[in-house]
Image (spheres, rainbow, N blue to C red):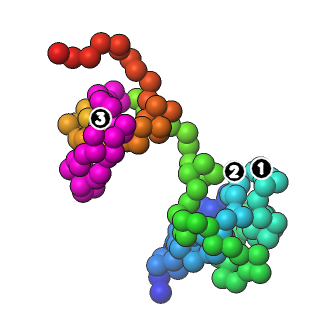
């Protein structure tokens, strides 16, 4: 196996080329509901104590240690998906959409397939012409009108 070198947590490290950057695929921490990853150089008191100690060991010694077995592991509801609220950035929708509250049930073809909307739900149309339903309560808590007029 070919070995490559790169910088990880400020250390020049060596790794098998086929495994570089793949530790998240194998580490239980990234699938555990108790895992709250750190920002390098900052402690996170909400993180799992075991994950925190493994992280500190990796940073202190330039290691990458996937956790294969753990007594505190609890599968997150979304399996191996990261929690965007913990590891992602905040975004605000900036696209303008057109929407109408429907007075009947409806079906609409979306990029993801046919979706069903109910009476009181909104039918939305995006800037690229795509359409989708949004449940009424979700729409009203998420979208704000930018005009009071409706087109003729």
CB atoms at circles 3 and 2 under 8 Å apart?
no
Residue 79 in which image quadrant: bottom right
CB atoms at circles 1 and 3 under 8 Å apart?
no
Task: Spot the residue most to the bottom.
Answer: 1
Residue 80 location, x and y as percent? 54, 69
C-alpha span from label 3 to label 2: 48 Å
Q: Is residue 98 above or below residue 41?
A: above
> Is residue 98 on the magenta stretch?
yes
Residue tagged 3: 103
C-alpha span from label 2 to label 1: 6 Å
Q: Residue at x 71, y 75 (%)?
A: 73
Mark 1 Cα shell of 10 Å, populated few (<14), some (14-19), many (≥20): few
C-alpha span from label 1 to label 3: 52 Å
Report the mark closest to the observer, 3 or 2: 3
Q: Nearer the viewer, residue 125 or 58?
A: 125
Residue 64 visible within the image: no
> Element at badge 2?
loop
Disc sitting over residue 42 in the figure: 1
> Element at badge 1?
loop
Q: Residue at x 51, y 77 (%)?
A: 19
Residue 118 location, x and y as percent? 33, 45
Q: Reading the chain from its start, which is encountered first: label 1 or label 3? A: 1
Residue tagged 2: 39
């Amino acid at each position: 196996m070919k070995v490559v070198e790169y910088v990880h947590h400020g250390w020049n490290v060596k790794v098998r080329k086929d495994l570089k950057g793949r530790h998240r695929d194998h580490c239980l921490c990234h699938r555990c509901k108790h895992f709250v990853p750190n920002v390098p150089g900052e402690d996170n008191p909400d993180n799992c104590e075991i994950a925190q100690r493994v992280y500190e060991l990796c940073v202190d010694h330039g290691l990458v240690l996937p956790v294969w077995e753990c007594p505190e592991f609890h599968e997150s509801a979304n399996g191996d998906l990261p929690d965007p609220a913990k590891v992602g950035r905040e975004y605000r929708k900036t696209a303008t959409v057109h929407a109408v509250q429907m007075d009947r049930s409806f079906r609409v073809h979306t990029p993801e397939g046919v979706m069903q909307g109910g009476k009181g739900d909104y039918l939305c149309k995006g800037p690229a012409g795509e359409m989708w339903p949004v449940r009424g309560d979700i729409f009203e808590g998420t979208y704000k009108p930018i005009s009071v007029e409706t087109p003729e």
